[in-house]
Image (spheres, grey):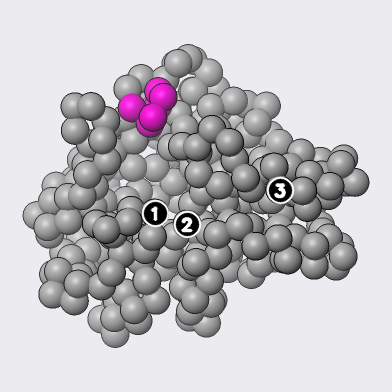
Amino acid sequence: MDTFPLGSHTVGRVGFGAMQLPGPGVFGPPRDHDQALAVLRRVVELGINHIDTAQIYGPNVANELIREALHPYADGLALVSKVGGRRDEQGNWLPAQDPDDLRRQLEENLSTLDTDRLAAVNLRAFNHDDPSLPAVLDRDLFDRQLTAMIAARDEGLIAGIGLSNVSADHLRVALERTEIVCVQNAYNLLDRTSQPVLDLSAEHGIAFVPFFPLGSGFVADNPVLKHPAVVREAEKLGRTPAQIVLAWTLSVAPNVLLIPGTSSVAHLEQNTAVRDITLDDDTRRDLDAAA
């Protein structure tokens, strides 16, 4: 399958994440403004119709670049954002989880992107004990958050509701109240903590959009790309380690959508080329055993 439903949109399984367009630490202006615009315009030229962003990327920077490069937006382009967090003046990532916060962030996304409606917005939950793990369900808060998200959808501000950094319990509770069109959780070759969430998403026909599919972008020494099985398969197939990992991630389940990000046109083209990579059974087995 080359495409999968994202709510009312049908998108290619390889999209683009705008997180790397702002400056270092996803904070401040890009190192090269013109290059950032060139990347976004090349995204559309490559036939990518799913762009993931957030007002907190910058803040504002990613959204403003998207608007400058691509507005007015092409028909069928799915712009997806997220709410639930904020940045302080030092660039720290902080939760902003109250329903009023979610509504304000949603309106900020619409304003900076200059659009009346987003294809989906993900409610990003936070694990206060360990931010690297999915959040623990707080039923009262989550119910109030869902009420705010449902209201935004019913008003036509968003076409679909997504969840991010959630447990399978979050997803089950949400599905009791409303349709969920996508789930964004950390997932990669070496970190499959969210496998139950992926499986539940697949069962309900919900797009699963892994973040950090190549490992965290905030660590200097990336164990995913340096894993011996990845390096071996990359050399065997004449591909980059990143391409091998992304191709493996696509092969995990048909509901997986990729949103690899970059600030380089050449890197973007390499990422997009994974659409044409098919891993044989032996390669899949070797990589499946890497965790």
Q: In the rendered view, would you say 131 is above or below 241?
A: below
Name which quarter of the figure residue 65 lies in. Answer: top left
Amino acid carrying label 3: it is His
Who's the residue at 33% across and 42% down the image?
A: 54
Residue 186 numbered mark, or none: 2
Neighbours of disc 3 within 10 Å: few (<14), some (14-19), many (20+): some
Q: What percent of the width, then of the height, locates residue 209?
A: 50, 58
Amino acid carrying label 2: it is Ala
Q: On the picture, is 38 further left or further right than 290?
A: left
Q: On the picture, is 289 further left or further right than 201?
A: right
Q: What percent of the width, then of the height, locates residue 247?
A: 71, 54
Instruction: Give the CA separation, mark 1 to mark 3.
Output: 20 Å
Amino acid carrying label 1: it is Ser
Q: Which residue is mark 3?
A: 227
Q: Which residues are magenta?
A: 22-27
Residue 35 numbered mark, or none: none
Q: On the picture, is 89 further left or further right than 123?
A: left
Q: What percent of the width, then of the height, locates residue 153?
A: 25, 64
Who's the residue at 49% across and 52% down the image?
A: 211
